[in-house]
Amino acid sequence: MKKFPIFLMLHNGDAMKELNETTPQTLQDLGFGGGIALWAIRACVAGRVNCCALVDGYERAFGAYGAQILSKLQMYTRFLGSHGNRRIGLGCSGCGAITHDEMSIIAVLAAGQSHALDSVHAHLSWLLASSPTEEQVQLVMDIGDGFAKHGIIIDSPEISISPARAPKKTTYWTGPAGNA
C-alpha cells in the first residue's frame, strides 16, 4: 500500500511567521462548517479520529449521523493521502493558521456541498495531481450533503491564483575540483 503523502507542518517560530505572511486566512475565517471539517481532517492525519472530543463534537453537531460523517471525512483524507501524486501540507491540530492546501481541501467540500461538479473536479485534480475518480467525487458530494442536511454550511475560502514564477537561474562551477 502506498504511504500517505499528507504530512503535518509543525508551525513554530519562523515557519509560523512565514505561514501567516503568505496565508491571508485563519481557521476562524473558514466559518463553522469549514472549521469542523478541517478539525476532523487534521485529526485523521494525526491518527486521532477516535479522539473523544472529536467524536463528541461531531455527535453534537450532527446528532446520530456524527459517526457516519466523521467516517466519510476519514475516507476523504485517506484517498487524498493514498491516491495523490503530490505532498499535501496540513497544519497541526489546534493551530489557528491554515495552509494553502487546507484551503483547497475545504474548497472541494464547499464545491461538493453546492454541487458544483466542475469546481470539485478542478480542486480534486489539483490536490491529487491527477484526475479524480467518480467514487472520489461522489464521496465529496456525500460529505457536502451530510453537512447541508444538518444546516452546516461549508463556505469556500477565498483562493487566489499567484502568477507563475520565472525559473531560477542555475549557476555551474567550472573550476578545479577538490581542495585545490
Image (cartoon, rainbow, N blue to C red):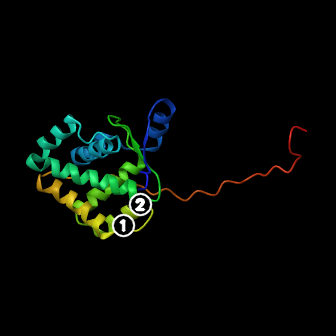
What quarter of the picture does the C terminus occupy? top right
Q: Secondary structure at mark 2?
A: helix
- Residue shown at the point (45%, 57%) measured from the top left: 161
Which residue occupies the extreme left position in the image? 64
Q: Quadrant of residue 111?
A: bottom left
Q: Position of residue 88 (x, y in %)?
A: 43, 50
Q: Position of residue 143 (x, y in %)?
A: 21, 57
- Residue shown at the point (17%, 43%) measured from the top left: 58
Which residue occupies the extreme top position in the image? 13
Label 1 – label 2 distance at C-alpha? 7 Å
- Residue shown at the point (13%, 43%) measured from the top left: 59
Q: Position of residue 97 (x, y in %)?
A: 38, 39
Q: Are marks 1 and 2 in contact (CB under 8 Å)?
A: yes
Which numbered dot is residue 132? Answer: 1
Q: Is residue 96 above or below residue 107?
A: above
In the image, is 177 to the left or to the right of 43?
A: right
- Residue shown at the point (62%, 58%) measured from the top left: 166
> Is residue 3 visible in this depiction of the protein?
yes
For mark 2, what is the residue? 128
Q: Position of residue 112 (x, y in %)?
A: 25, 62
